[in-house]
Image (cartoon, rainbow, N blue to C red):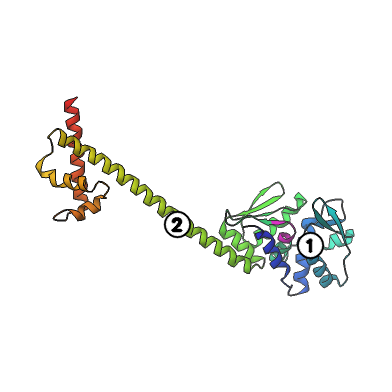
Amino acid sequence: MKGYSEALRLELCKKAPSNIQEAFVELQGIIGSRKKSGNNLIYTERLNVANRVTILWKMVFGNSLSIDITKYKNAYRFSIKLSEEYFKLLDWQGEMPRDFLRGVFLACGFISDPEKCYRIELLPLERTFTHYITRALDAIGIRYTIYIRKVSIVGFPKVEKFLSSIGIRQGLIKLEEIRTLKLIKEDTNRRINFQESNIEKTLLSAERELEAIKTLIVNNKLPDKYRKIAELRLTYPQATLRELAELSQPPVSKSTIAYYMRKLEKLADDNIKSKS
């Protein structure tokens, strides 16, 4: 589903922090994810994230940030210059991991198209920052994998728990709708494949039975006790064994029809072998 990550980010950006501490910890997640060693600039290509930083900053520190906007490739880059003192102050200490991870997701998170798979990736600029991310995930009990500086959360239960933990509500409803539709579609496909497989097996079995009956008739080897069953198969060449059992007079069980058909095939095989 196109734009699902951005829809989640937009929902989070609309969420007002309940207090200054929550705003501060979320800010730590954003700033830390975008900080690069030896550089006092942080940047993002997302306007809503840049706006979120300024709102949180104003709430926490009581002053405004200056954002520099530059054209970068086919988009705009929003850069914020911070002093080293602020970077030290915004170093996460382990408290309120859910709010911290909300900031991380806003700054460097991505969720794959849920119509294809359930996967969240958190990719900070610095490899060392993954330690903070995994520490927060451990604190709320979400399992993950790490590759260099990318932290991945895979599987519906873990993705659902992560999104719920960082405050996503509407996005989770959409995710559940997509999952339900996927399950219905998968179940329907399984049923169709199963039915097609059964139909194919039925037709192949019927074809073998017809060949056996014709062989016995041509060679005048069809026993009288099987003649009614053979005529029934010749009359209804595409019927299932269950249908033949119901059409039989008197009606018999499916297993009885199956037994008769196996006997007819064996008789035909024996006849062919004796001729050889």
Residue at the location (59% across, 59% down)? 158
Element type where label 1 sits in the image: helix
Residue at the location (73% across, 75% down)? 18
Crowd class of label 1 (few under 14; some 14 to 19; many from 20; radius 10 Å): few
Instruction: Give the residue number, with chain letter if any, for mark 1.
Output: 47
202 w.r.t. 54: above or below:
above
170 w.r.t. 184: above or below:
below
Instruction: Point out residue 9 in the picture as x, y percentages from the top left corner.
Output: 70, 63
Q: Count the marks: how many?
A: 2
Residue at the location (77% across, 56% down)? 33
Residue 187's label in the rendered image is 2
Amino acid beneath label 2: Asp
Q: Is residue 97 magenta-colored?
A: no
Per the picture, the main secondary structure of the magenta-coloured stretch is helix
66 w.r.t. 212: above or below:
below
Crowd class of label 2 (few under 14; some 14 to 19; many from 20; radius 10 Å): few
Amino acid beneath label 1: Leu
Part of the protein shown in magenta: 104-109
Visible residue check, residue 212: yes
Element type where label 2 sits in the image: helix
Tell me if 225 is positioned left or right of 253 in this view. Answer: left
